[in-house]
Image (spheres, rainbow, N blue to C red):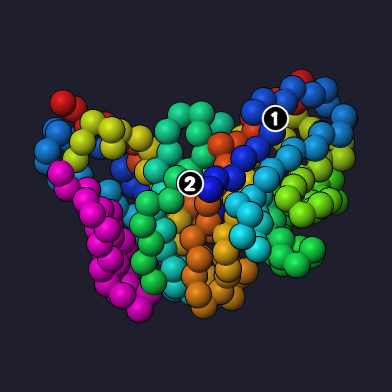
């Protein structure tokens, strides 16, 4: 069964460093998402991406964050200068479609980011 | 932001009995609702969804009920199995908000053999 994959599973970085989290969405999916879950808190939406553009982003997704689809398979989240409060599980998700057709989002296993 | 709430942080059920997980929402623009199951150290796994034009959707042992007037949905699992033990999240989306999902805080279900 197709699945979303994410690497690395755990990333430890020092405050102020840049990190890139990687995801390979399901191959026929067109919409891609990043969510995060700080320990003990809800899963929160960060950004959605379609046709090489950001389609929606939350208030969390400030100028320190960026997303890219560098090739036909990978989808990346970059945090330019990490802060302690960026420590969280980051989940990538993908869906076939969006909007009125209401396609489900399928999630990857997550990357645990620890900022020290 | 409490647009989607799961008021019960945990639920314990005997194997073979029904599990009922509840979810309330406040945003009347939500028109699509999903339930996800999550095991430790894994991502959320999609279970079942329901559009706001329906009041029930069934898939095997899982049934989701939607009461739009009460802004309430529930997930019924019957019969419950020990392998169902996990954290269950309800999520909602608004067609006008780019399909971003707003999650509840989750309910930990424990099914005892």
- The part of the chain drawn in magenta is B52-79
Q: Earlier in the sequence, mark 1 or mark 2?
A: 2
**Front one among A62 and B59:** B59
Considering the image in quadrants, where does the N terminus of chain B appear?
A: bottom right
Count how many numbered circles sit on residues in the image.
2
Q: Which mark is residue A1?
A: 2
Q: Is residue B12 left or right of residue A31?
A: left
- Residue A11 figure quarter: top right
Residue at image coords 79%, 24%: A13
Q: Residue under circle 1?
A: A8
Q: Are marks 1 and 2 in contact (CB under 8 Å)?
A: no
Q: Is residue A39 above or below residue A60?
A: above
> Picture coordinates of residue B42 (x, y %)?
50, 34
> Picture coordinates of residue A35 (x, y %)?
62, 47
Q: Assess whether residue A71 is covered by the magenta stretch.
A: no
Residue A40 shows up from this direction: no
The answer to whether tags 1 and 2 share a subunit is: yes
Residue at image coords 61%, 60%: A28
Residue at image coords 79%, 65%: A53
């Amino acid at each position: 069964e197709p699945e979303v994959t994410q690497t690395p599973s755990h990333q430890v970085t020092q405050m102020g460093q840049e990190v890139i989290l990687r995801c390979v969405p399901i191959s026929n999916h067109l919409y891609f998402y990043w969510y995060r879950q700080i320990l003990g808190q809800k899963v929160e939406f960060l950004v959605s991406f379609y046709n090489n553009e950001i389609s929606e982003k939350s208030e969390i997704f400030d100028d320190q964050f960026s997303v890219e689809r560098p090739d036909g398979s990978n989808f990346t989240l970059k945090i330019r200068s990490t802060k302690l409060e960026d420590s969280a599980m980051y989940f990538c998700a993908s869906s076939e479609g969006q909007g009125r057709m209401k396609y489900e989002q399928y999630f990857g296993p997550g990357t645990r980011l620890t900022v020290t | 932001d409490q647009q989607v709430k799961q008021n019960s942080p945990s639920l314990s059920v005997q194997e073979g009995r029904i599990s009922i997980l509840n979810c309330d929402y406040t945003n009347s623009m939500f028109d699509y609702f999903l339930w996800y199951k999550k095991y430790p150290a894994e991502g959320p796994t999609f279970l079942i969804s329901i559009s706001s034009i329906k009041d029930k959707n069934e898939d095997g042992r899982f049934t989701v009920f939607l009461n739009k007037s009460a802004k309430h949905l529930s997930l019924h699992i019957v019969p419950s199995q020990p392998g169902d033990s996990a954290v269950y999240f309800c999520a909602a989306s608004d067609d006008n908000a780019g399909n971003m999902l707003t999650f509840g805080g989750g309910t930990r279900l424990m099914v005892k053999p």
